[in-house]
Image (spheres, rainbow, N blue to C red):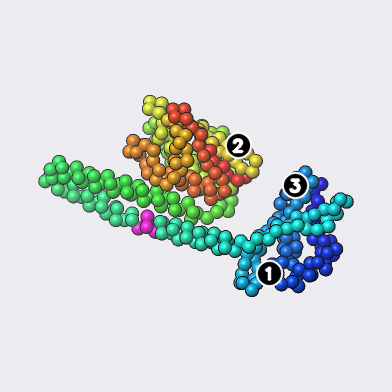
């Protein structure tokens, strides 16, 4: 049976020593460490004897201002199994916490900037597209072939830029959706994604089958984005002349649900398995449409829920995309 530290009994037996620490010139965090640990979680230290530690991060105000300390304490047992002492460590982690907060604040500001910039860029791009089309329509008979070709370049460039802006907007919005207040039926999210892809599914003759899927604590919008991006990629990167065959499964793996989207497409070389999750990373140039941000959005969503995403694939043998979501 796991033996837990009785701090009350420890203080009764060792009160003089604790009081001596409290009256010493040590930082204010000392002396009250035992009481602090009583509020921390149990952390297994040695499973063979059931010893547990107490671990917590605590803020203290002292002569040097507010500092944050990381505590961990472990009971020391006598030969008879009684707690006779506590061994512990204390670390000042204030600088680390300040740096983490600055990084969080900088990331938030960057996300807001990207969202605002991408949102505000859409209107000028729309104007470029509209007026280039009007010029071509009204004065096309007065322009030579070279001029018409240049206008085509303008329109196609504006279309690509608009697509990039839309994807950048989608990427930043993944961090702005509120955490779910209720669980999501993964099957319903998948079916909604399949409905959104109905056109390309019909055009390519894609076959999509799925096993029973669980209920997960993920926002339905995020889960739909995951399925839609991964299934959309499976259809896009199909082998010539071979209809896409896609299978969606989910299995319980410890404290996570592990989803898998497998396909029979062109596959991915091993050296690119990490690169494909980068923002605007494209492996095939203009051979395939898109901006190369879809998998980056998937990774951003999965990591927000403390899961991970990866791929197992061989060129010409299809791909298996996995992602995990906490139970």
Instruction: Tell me how far mark 1 sits from mark 3, CA to CA.
Output: 30 Å
Residue 84 is left or right of residue 294, and the answer is right
> Looking at the image, is mark 3 or mark 2 earlier in the sequence?
3
- Label tally: 3
Q: Which mark is residue 46?
A: 3
Residue 109 in percent (x, y) is at: 45, 61
Most common SS among magenta residues: helix
Residue 203 in percent (x, y) is at: 38, 32
Residue drawn where x is 58% and y is 53% of the image: 181
Quadrant of image for the C terminus: top right
Instruction: Tell me how far mark 3 sits from mark 2, CA to CA.
Output: 31 Å
Front in this rendered view, residue 102 or 297: 102
> Looking at the image, is mark 2 or mark 1 earlier in the sequence?
1
Q: Residue 62 carries which label?
A: none
**Residue 54 appears in the figure:** yes
At numbered mark 2, what does the secondary structure look like: helix, strand or loop?
Answer: strand
Residue drawn where x is 50% and y is 59% of the image: 103
Task: Classify 197 as above or below 111.
Answer: above
Residue 165 in percent (x, y) is at: 36, 51
Q: Which marked residue is nearer to the observer: mark 2 or mark 1?
A: 1
Residue drawn where x is 50% and y is 37% of the image: 311
Residue 106 is left or right of residue 40, and the answer is left
Residue highlighted by disc 1: 27
Q: What stretch is highlighted in magenta?
A: 116-120
Q: Which mark is residue 251?
A: 2
Residue 265 shown in magenta: no
Label 3 Cα crowd, 10 Å radius (few <14 / some 14-19 / many 20+): few
Q: Which marked residue is nearer to the observer: mark 3 or mark 2?
A: 3
Front in this rendered view, residue 286 or 188: 286
Residue drawn where x is 36% and y is 48% of the image: 164
């Amino acid at each position: 049976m796991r033996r837990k530290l009785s701090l009350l009994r420890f203080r009764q037996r060792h009160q003089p020593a604790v009081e001596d620490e409290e009256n010493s010139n040590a930082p204010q965090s000392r002396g009250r460490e035992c009481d602090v640990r009583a509020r921390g979680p149990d952390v297994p230290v040695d499973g063979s004897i059931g010893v547990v530690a107490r671990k917590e991060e605590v803020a203290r105000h002292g002569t040097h201002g507010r500092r944050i300390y990381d505590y961990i304490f472990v009971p020391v047992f006598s030969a008879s199994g009684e707690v006779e002492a506590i061994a512990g460590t204390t670390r000042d982690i204030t600088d680390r916490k300040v740096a983490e907060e600055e990084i969080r604040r900088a990331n938030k500001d960057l996300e807001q900037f990207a969202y605002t910039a991408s949102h505000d860029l859409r209107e000028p791009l729309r104007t470029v597209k509209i007026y280039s089309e009007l010029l071509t329509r009204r004065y096309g008979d007065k322009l030579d072939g070279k001029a018409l070709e240049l206008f085509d370049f303008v329109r196609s460039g504006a279309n690509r830029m608009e697509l990039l802006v839309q994807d950048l907007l989608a990427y930043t919005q993944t961090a702005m959706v509120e955490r779910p207040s209720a669980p999501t039926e993964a099957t319903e999210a998948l079916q909604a994604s399949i409905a959104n892809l109905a056109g390309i599914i019909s055009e390519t003759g894609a076959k999509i089958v799925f096993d029973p899927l669980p209920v997960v604590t993920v926002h339905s919008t995020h889960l739909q984005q995951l399925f839609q991006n991964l299934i959309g990629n499976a259809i896009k990167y199909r082998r010539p002349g071979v209809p896409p065959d896609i299978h969606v499964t989910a299995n319980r793996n410890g404290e996570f649900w592990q989803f898998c989207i497998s396909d029979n497409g062109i596959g991915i070389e091993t050296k690119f398995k990490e690169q494909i999750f980068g923002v605007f990373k494209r492996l095939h140039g203009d051979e395939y449409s898109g901006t190369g941000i879809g998998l980056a959005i998937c990774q951003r969503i999965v990591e927000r829920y403390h899961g991970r995403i990866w791929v197992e694939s061989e060129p010409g043998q299809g791909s298996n995309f996995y992602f995990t979501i906490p139970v």
